[in-house]
């Protein structure tokens, strides 16, 4: 078969050569000689075998177990061929670029390099763990006490699944939690309980997962340093959730901490735990107050490296000379070299710690003293560094924030004074809140803080200010007050009288008898008393009585009867809908009403002259509706409201004492959800008053007693309810929605009382102050409008330049051909030689 393939290939090459030679193309001979033919056959055989080998390998069936269950994936990825130990069959397994097998043993495929954008804002731990388990094919165990905790993982760009998986462990560490490996499951527990659990344990060597925030145990063998000094250093570097146990007999340290922090700690310890030099070396921790520890350590390294180079340079010069002068020079230079940074000032390790701003030094005593002196000279507060700084606030009030910060600084001053008085021998803490004195003053005009502090104290203060100076949410509160007053009054009464002159008209003697109950009077017909159903009857005047009573009283009828039946109904329906907008944790006040004068007292002048009145003292009081609300937005869109309502109204008017007011007050604290209407209080009152005016004994008679009594019955019903609805403002578009809703309610009010009538309100919305997509659309419309205006102006100018045609459109214009123009040719003079 190979020989047939060989001859067919030669015939194809020969035919192509003859065809190309006919076309004029160059072609060399492809027919090999007899010596080259075996080599050609061998190469073709190898090529044919290589093409068939992957198909043969892929055709081999895969075993059911190769270190577990192995699955085959797409052949587009890079493959790896290996043989199993049991059946020695070739298996092709898909691999990623890093050489790890994709997918797990249970058939779940993990896309570690898939880029996603997770956003867990105020999400529960149960929801986050469920999402992580789905993406990474991991199993988790969560207790009921922890699954309701909240995690916050917020990203602005897309990241890989591997990065999100590491961020999940970091979020657990930030919330004092960790994950423990139990078989194929991850068990989420509290970080302080991980010391007594079966967490992964490692010995001297590199961690398997040094970057993950997972609680692990590491057993470190201290070789050259003192174990107690190393343990004291580790307690300052480990996290609060970790722990350290020392074992003196074996000179080992057991460290329990997060793997990410343990990676840093072991790197420092391994750098320090080295064989000591001939001189005795010591481990010291030096504190840097004003400068940065990393910069100071770098300068110290540069100084001591220059000393070592100078010593090596002098030693090389001495070795080149062999005379006596060289020997003397060797003595002098050796003494100088020790002073310039030789063995007398030997620094083995110099490690800065950025978190505590300290420098860890491993050197002999003379070198440590020299390093301490250098740090003292370098670590000073620079006069040009600026002790007074001004920080402008964005959202918070400068006066309120200055009070909070002043309380913090005063607390640190008191602690510092107490520590100075005691002067105990206890060691100082690794890091205090503030190093020096800090003063904070507020500037109300610019809403800024003036801070007097060192650079490090200012940076510490700035971190606190940034966390407090944040935008607070706003709450729009709608209140509905429903008040209903119903009054029913009934009155039925009869009054009469009779009189006569007992003597003659010249010497009159009056005799009269009758009843007067309530406001009825049968002696005089008062028009104001003729209300309701009224009936009256009077006789003629008694003769001679006018002279007896005088002209002021007039005459008296001989008899009179007055009957009145009256019923009055009063219905009052009040609906008040106040609304107010305020910021969370800020009290808002709304007051609507009148300022009414009240008589506080009367001062008598002490004179009886006519026209001189007494002096009255007047005081004005507010008769109004007063609302005080203080909202607080909690987690889950719940609003806590401190509500206080006071409603004062005029109940009546007394001509002597003045007006009478009624007062209704509600004060409560409620918790309501966003856009949820709550009934916060109310009052329902039912009052019945039965009154009767009668003549004793006669008014109690069964039938005739109705002529001697007047009945009065009053029924009053009062109902008041208060409703409240909070609306959390999450975006600026919510203000527009509230405006449109209120304008719609106003239009409905106008239509109810004035008919269908549209009242337009001018829209003062300024589109020039918009941002985002609206601003981009506005700019596009503005530029397109300018382009359209320019094109219109060009078209108008072109139309103006157009002239009327000298011929009609049907006629053909006469085209005048221009005459050929002679172009003068300049004469060229021959150049003179």
Image (spheres, grey):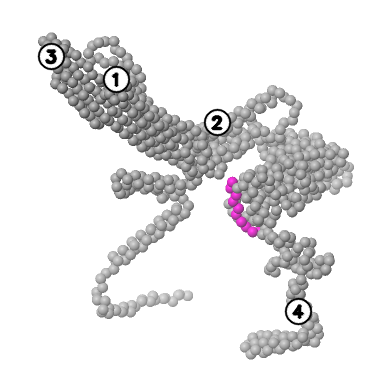
Indicate which label's residue lies in the foreground, 2 or 1: 1
If you read the primary sequence from the N terminus, does the residue marked by circle 1 or circle 4 appear first?
Answer: 4
Secondary element at tag 2: helix
Residue 444 is at least partly visible in this image: no
Quick check: can you spot residue 505? Answer: yes
Residue at mark 1: 698
Give percent across and percent down for residue 706: 28, 25
The label shown at residue 637 is: none
Earlier-in-chain disc, 2 versus 4 = 4
Q: Residue at x 35, y 19 (%)?
A: 600
- Residue 132, position as x, y percentages in the image: 65, 53
Q: Distance between the residues labelled 1 and 4?
A: 141 Å
**Residue 453 versus residue 329: which sits nearer the camera?**
453
The residue located at (45%, 55%) in the rendering is 776
Q: Which residue is painted at 36% across and 37% down in the image?
A: 573
How far apart are the alpha carbons under marks 2 and 3? 92 Å
User: Which residue carries the number 4 mark?
Assistant: 48
Numbered label attached to residue 544: 3
Is 116 magenta? The answer is: yes
Element class at badge 1: helix
From what the image shows, is residue 405 above or below residue 73?
above
**Disc 4 packing (10 Å; few <14; some 14–19; many ≥20):** few
């Amino acid at each position: 078969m190979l020989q047939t393939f060989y001859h067919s290939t030669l015939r194809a090459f020969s035919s192509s050569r003859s065809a190309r030679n006919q076309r004029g193309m160059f072609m060399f001979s492809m027919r090999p000689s007899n010596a080259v033919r075996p080599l050609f056959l061998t190469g073709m055989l190898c090529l044919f075998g290589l093409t068939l080998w992957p198909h043969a390998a892929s055709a081999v069936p895969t075993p059911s177990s190769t270190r577990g269950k192995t699955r085959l994936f797409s052949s587009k990825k890079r493959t790896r061929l290996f043989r199993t130990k049991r059946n020695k069959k070739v298996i092709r397994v898909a691999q990623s670029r890093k050489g790890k097998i994709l997918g797990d043993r249970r058939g779940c495929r993990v896309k570690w390099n898939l880029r996603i954008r997770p956003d867990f804002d105020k999400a529960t731990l149960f929801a986050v763990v469920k999402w992580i388990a789905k993406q990474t094919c991991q199993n988790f165990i969560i207790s009921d006490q922890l699954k309701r905790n909240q995690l916050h993982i917020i990203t602005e760009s897309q990241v890989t699944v591997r990065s999100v998986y590491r961020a999940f462990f970091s979020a657990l560490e930030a919330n004092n939690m960790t994950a423990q490996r139990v078989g194929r499951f991850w068990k989420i527990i509290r970080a302080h309980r991980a010391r007594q659990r079966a967490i992964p344990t490692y010995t001297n060597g590199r961690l398997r997962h040094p970057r993950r925030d997972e609680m692990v145990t590491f057993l470190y063998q201290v070789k050259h340093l003192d174990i107690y000094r190393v343990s004291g250093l580790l307690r300052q570097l480990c996290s609060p959730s970790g722990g350290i146990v020392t074992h003196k007999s074996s000179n080992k340290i057991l460290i329990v901490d997060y793997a990410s922090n343990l990676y840093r700690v072991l790197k420092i310890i391994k750098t320090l735990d080295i064989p000591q030099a001939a001189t005795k070396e010591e481990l010291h921790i030096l504190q840097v107050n004003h400068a940065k520890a990393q910069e100071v350590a770098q300068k110290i390294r540069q100084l001591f490296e220059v000393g070592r180079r100078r010593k090596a340079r002098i030693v090389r010069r001495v070795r080149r000379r062999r005379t006596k002068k060289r020997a003397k020079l060797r003595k002098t230079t050796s003494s100088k070299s020790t002073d310039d940074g030789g063995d007398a000032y030997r620094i083995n390790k110099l490690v800065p710690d950025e978190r505590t701003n300290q420098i860890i030094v491993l050197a002999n005593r003379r070198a440590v003293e020299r390093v301490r002196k250098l740090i003292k000279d370098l670590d000073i507060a620079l006069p040009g560094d600026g002790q007074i700084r001004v920080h402008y606030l964005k959202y918070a009030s400068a006066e309120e924030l200055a009070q909070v910060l002043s309380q913090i600084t005063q607390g640190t001053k008191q602690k510092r004074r107490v520590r100075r008085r005691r002067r105990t021998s206890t060691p100082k803490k690794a890091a205090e809140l503030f190093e020096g004195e800090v003063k904070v003053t507020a500037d109300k005009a610019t809403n800024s803080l003036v801070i007097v502090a060192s650079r490090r104290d200012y940076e510490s203060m700035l971190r606190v200010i940034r966390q407090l100076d944040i935008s607070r949410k706003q709450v729009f509160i709608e209140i509905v007050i429903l008040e209903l007053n119903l009054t029913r009054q009934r009155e039925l009464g009869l009054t009469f009288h009779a009189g006569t002159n007992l003597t003659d008209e010249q010497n009159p003697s009056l005799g009269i008898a009758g009843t007067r109950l309530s406001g009825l009077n049968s002696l005089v017909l008062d028009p104001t008393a003729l209300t309701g159903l009224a009936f009256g009857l009077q006789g003629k005047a008694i003769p001679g009585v006018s002279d007896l009573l005088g002209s002021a009283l007039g005459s008296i009828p001989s008899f009179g009867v007055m009957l009145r039946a009256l019923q009055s109904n009063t219905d009052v329906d009040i609906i008040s809908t106040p609304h107010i907008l305020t910021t969370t944790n800020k009290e808002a006040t709304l007051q609507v009403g009148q300022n009414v004068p009240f008589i506080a007292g009367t001062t008598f002048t002490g004179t009886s002259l006519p026209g001189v009145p007494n002096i009255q003292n007047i005081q004005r009081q507010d008769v109004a509706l007063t609302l005080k609300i203080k909202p607080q937005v909690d987690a889950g869109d719940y609003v806590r409201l401190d509500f206080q309502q006071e409603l004062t109204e005029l109940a009546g008017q007394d001509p002597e004492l003045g007006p009478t007011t009624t007062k209704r007050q509600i004060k409560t604290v409620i918790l309501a959800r966003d856009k949820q209407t709550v009934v916060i209080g109310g009052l329902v009152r039912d009052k019945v008053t039965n009154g009767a005016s009668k003549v004793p004994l006669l008014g109690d008679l069964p039938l005739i007693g109705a002529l001697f009594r007047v009945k009065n019955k009053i029924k009053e019903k009062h109902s008041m309810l208060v409703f409240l609805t909070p609306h959390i403002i999450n975006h600026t578009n919510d203000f527009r929605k509230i405006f449109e809703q209120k304008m719609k309610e106003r239009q409905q009010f106008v239509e109810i009382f004035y008919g269908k009538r549209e009242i337009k309100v001018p829209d003062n919305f300024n589109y020039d102050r918009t941002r985002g997509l609206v601003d981009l659309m506005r700019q596009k419309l503005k530029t397109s409008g300018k382009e359209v205006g320019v094109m219109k102006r060009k078209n108008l100018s072109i139309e103006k330049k157009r002239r009327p045609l000298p011929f009609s459109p049907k006629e053909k214009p006469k085209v005048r051909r221009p005459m050929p123009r002679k172009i003068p040719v300049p004469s060229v003079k021959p150049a003179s030689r």
